[in-house]
Image: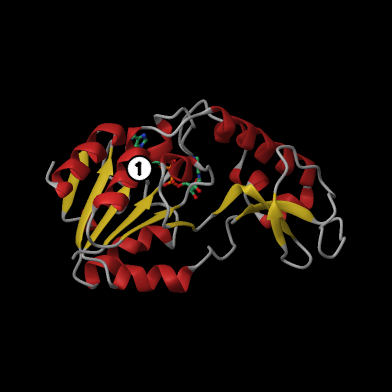
């Protein structure tokens, strides 16, 4: 029974209507990464950062999972071996599409995190800078998002999954953000068949054994049907 480990990025949510990091007219294009996705940016201007993620949380609530999210849930339900989905996305479209074994390595919009005591709790739809932590009462609530310069979640467990993978697939990720961009090398080193789903070759595209080019809603759905033999 084969173990399949799947890494997803912003490209899998693009067809649901959430702009990728690189989209020219998206939310991200209106802000500098250093301002909205670093701990230093948050310290400089917490209001800007909290508002940015409030807008992303509102947008994520308005969109629906697409065929690629649903195909991965189907793979998990019907494949005889293990299926692990690791996402860099902070939306909840995998969960809503039906995936159960899921790691949000860069955090998620539905979470709040105390910058003082690390307590985590469900974020309200609209956070405000200085919201109090329900555990320690410090006015230090922040979105539970892993910013640039911070350590992604569950790294030890993720590398264990990668070292046991028979198939490693990366879907809709540009291969620019580490450590996720290094997962292909890890899985390949462990003997996995590696496959990239993207509209174009990613920055680490040369490391994949196989490429499927096109919108994830089509390529991933087709791949899952092939794997399941129906
Ligand atoms: P990215 O924007 O850097 O790259 C997106 C990739 O998806 C590109 O390579 C693009 O060619 C590809 N793509 C676009 N549409 C596609 C489609 N329909 N089918 C297949 N591929 C498609 O995103 P990234 O690699 O995930 O990394 C950027 C960082 O930004 C991550 O840390 C992520 O957490 C964050 N981010 C998250 C979201 C989200 O949660 N939905 C959205 C934007 C950015």
The residue positioned 59% from the left and 45% from the top of the image is 33
Relative to 12, is 176 above or below? below
Q: Quadrant of ligand 1?
A: top left
Question: SS for tag 1?
Answer: loop
Q: What's the residue at 23%, 66% (across, down)? A: 188
Relative to 152, say whether 77 is above or below: above
Which residue corresponds to mark 1? Answer: 172
Q: Residue 82: x percent and y percent?
A: 29, 62
99 or 125, nearer to the observer: 99
Horizontal and vertical percent position of residue 146: 59, 56
Count numbered badges in the picture: 1
The quarter of the image holding the C terminus is: top left
Which residue sits at x=38%, y=39%?
12
Would you identify the image quadrant in which residue 221 lies? top left
Cβ of mark 1 under 8 A from ligand 1: yes
Question: Taking 60 as reference, is 167 above or below it?
Answer: below
Query: Residue 135, image x and y in percent?
Result: 81, 63
Query: Quadrant where the N terminus lies?
Result: bottom left
**Pointer 1 local density, CA inside 10 Å: few below 14, some 14–19, many at least 20:** many
In the displayed structure, does residue 133 sit left or right of residue 53? right
Figure check: 159 above or below 223: below
158 sits to left or right of 34: left
Left/right placement of residue 202 relative to residue 9 reads left
Picture coordinates of residue 23, whole percent (x, y) = 46, 31
Q: Nearer the viewer, residue 72 or 47?
A: 72
């Amino acid at each position: 029974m084969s173990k399949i480990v799947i890494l997803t990025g912003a490209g899998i949510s693009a067809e649901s209507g959430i702009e990728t990091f690189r989209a020219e007219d998206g939310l991200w294009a209106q802000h500098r990464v250093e301002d909205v996705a670093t701990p230093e940016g948050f310290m400089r201007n917490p209001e800007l950062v909290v508002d940015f993620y409030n807008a992303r949380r509102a947008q994520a609530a308005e969109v629906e999972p697409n065929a690629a999210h649903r195909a991965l849930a189907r793979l998990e339900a019907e494949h005889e071996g293990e299926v692990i989905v690791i996402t860099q996305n902070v939306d909840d479209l995998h969960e809503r599409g039906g995936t159960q074994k899921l790691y949000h390595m860069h955090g998620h919009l539905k979470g709040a995190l105390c910058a003082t005591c690390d307590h985590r709790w469900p974020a309200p739809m609209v956070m405000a800078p200085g919201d109090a932590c329900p555990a320690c009462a410090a006015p230090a609530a922040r979105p539970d998002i892993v910013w640039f310069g911070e350590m992604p979640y569950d790294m030890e467990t993720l590398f264990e999954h990668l070292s046991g993978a028979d198939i490693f697939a990366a879907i809709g990720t540009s291969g620019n953000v580490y450590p996720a961009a290094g997962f292909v090398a890890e899985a390949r080193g462990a003997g996995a068949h590696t496959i990239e789903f993207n509209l174009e070759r990613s920055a680490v595209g040369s490391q994949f054994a196989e490429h499927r080019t096109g919108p994830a809603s089509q390529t991933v759905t087709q791949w899952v049907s092939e794997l399941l033999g129906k």
